[in-house]
């Protein structure tokens, strides 16, 4: 068996075409969606991520504002910037690029963002909405994973899903989203015993722990679906995920590549959340789109 690839680039392009239509409708009504991105310091990886996000905004017509600040910025001054953006009616989404310098409390910063503009889905209000099944922002990476499963028409009802990683950004919200679709979920982490025993029982595996080759061929049941959220580098400096791709591809039914898998979907779902935030403030535009 050779796995079918779930191509995140192709799916992202399809979803962004729909987003362009929604943005045009909002813009025509005088409500262009706006995203503000704050970058503190000069972390090279963060600079790349932010540049890609701003470029993606331009592609679908979202108004973007990029605020670059030195890593000497105080937490107080950062909170002042966020408060100003909270009050700005032209901004529908606020994103503070993580990680932040050590002297800034990241959780305090996240909680300072208005829940109505929390397009990253990290605010405690967003987490609570996801936990209870209420309407709210879903974190972008696991949201993108759910869209990838939808693209292959994968019915999660009754399936056993194993999520490797328990971060607030991916692992925990991923588990909640899968539960909402009636999967039976096992959430694994660094203290899990007999990880391979659990993954071999899984119909779906989401690897999101940030450890290269944490999932190998012998750990996967034939015909399983594997989503690789990891971003690592091999000994040659080449980008790779958490999954031993060449090995696992021989037994899985579907697998996401790295690069070109979950990564593009993360940015696309950020765009989706920003557009959705603008639509919530302008429900007549959203209703008009639904009727067409």
Image (cartoon, helix red, strand yellow):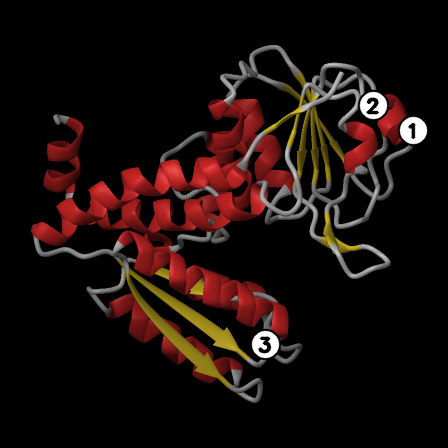
Q: Is residue 200 among the parts visible in the rendering?
A: yes
Query: How many angstroms separate mark 2 from mark 3 (CA)?
Result: 38 Å
Residue 201 in the image: state x and y as whole percent.
80, 16
- Of marks 2 and 3, which one's residue comes earlier in the chain? 3
Judge depth for marks 2 and 3 and give the one in front: 2
Residue of label 2: 198
Q: Is residue 129 among the parts visible in the rendering?
A: no
Residue of label 1: 194
Residue of label 3: 104
Q: Residues within 10 Å of mark 3 (few under 14, many from 20)?
A: some
Residue 264 in the image: state x and y as whole percent.
51, 47
Does 250 sit above or below residue 159? below
Could you tell me if the residues under marks 1 and 2 are in contact, i.e. CB atoms within 8 Å? yes
- Of marks 1 and 3, which one's residue comes earlier in the chain? 3
Q: Nearer the viewer, residue 71 or 25?
A: 25
Q: Secondary structure at mark 1?
A: loop
Q: Nearer the viewer, residue 1 or 212?
A: 1
């Amino acid at each position: 068996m050779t796995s079918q690839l779930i191509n995140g680039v192709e799916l992202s392009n399809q979803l962004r075409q729909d987003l362009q239509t929604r943005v045009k409708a909002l813009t025509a009504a005088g409500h262009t969606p706006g995203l503000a991105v704050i970058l503190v310091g000069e972390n090279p990886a963060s600079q790349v991520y932010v540049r890609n996000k701003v470029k993606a905004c331009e592609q679908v017509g979202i108004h973007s504002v990029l605020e670059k600040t030195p890593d000497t910025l105080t937490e107080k001054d950062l909170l002042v910037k966020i408060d100003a953006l909270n009050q700005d009616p032209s901004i529908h989404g606020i994103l503070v690029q993580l990680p932040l310098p050590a002297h800034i409390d990241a959780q305090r910063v996240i909680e300072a963002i208005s829940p109505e503009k929390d397009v990253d889905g990290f605010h405690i209000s967003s987490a609570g909405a996801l936990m209870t099944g209420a309407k709210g922002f879903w974190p972008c990476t696991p949201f993108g994973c759910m869209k990838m499963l939808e693209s292959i028409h994968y019915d999660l009802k009754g399936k056993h899903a194993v999520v490797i990683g328990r971060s607030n950004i991916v692992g925990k919200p991923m588990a909640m989203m899968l539960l909402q679709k009636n999967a039976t979920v096992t959430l694994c982490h660094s203290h899990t015993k007999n990880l391979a025993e659990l993954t071999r029982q899984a119909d779906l595996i989401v690897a999101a722990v940030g450890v290269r080759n944490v999932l190998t061929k012998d750990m996967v049941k034939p015909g399983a679906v594997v989503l690789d959220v990891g971003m690592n580098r091999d000994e040659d400096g080449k980008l790779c995920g958490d999954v031993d791709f060449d090995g696992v591809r021989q037994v899985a039914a579907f697998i996401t590549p790295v690069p070109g898998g979950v990564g593009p979907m993360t940015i696309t779902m950020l765009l989706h959340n920003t557009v959705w935030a603008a639509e919530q403030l302008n429900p007549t535009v959203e209703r008009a789109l639904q009727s067409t």
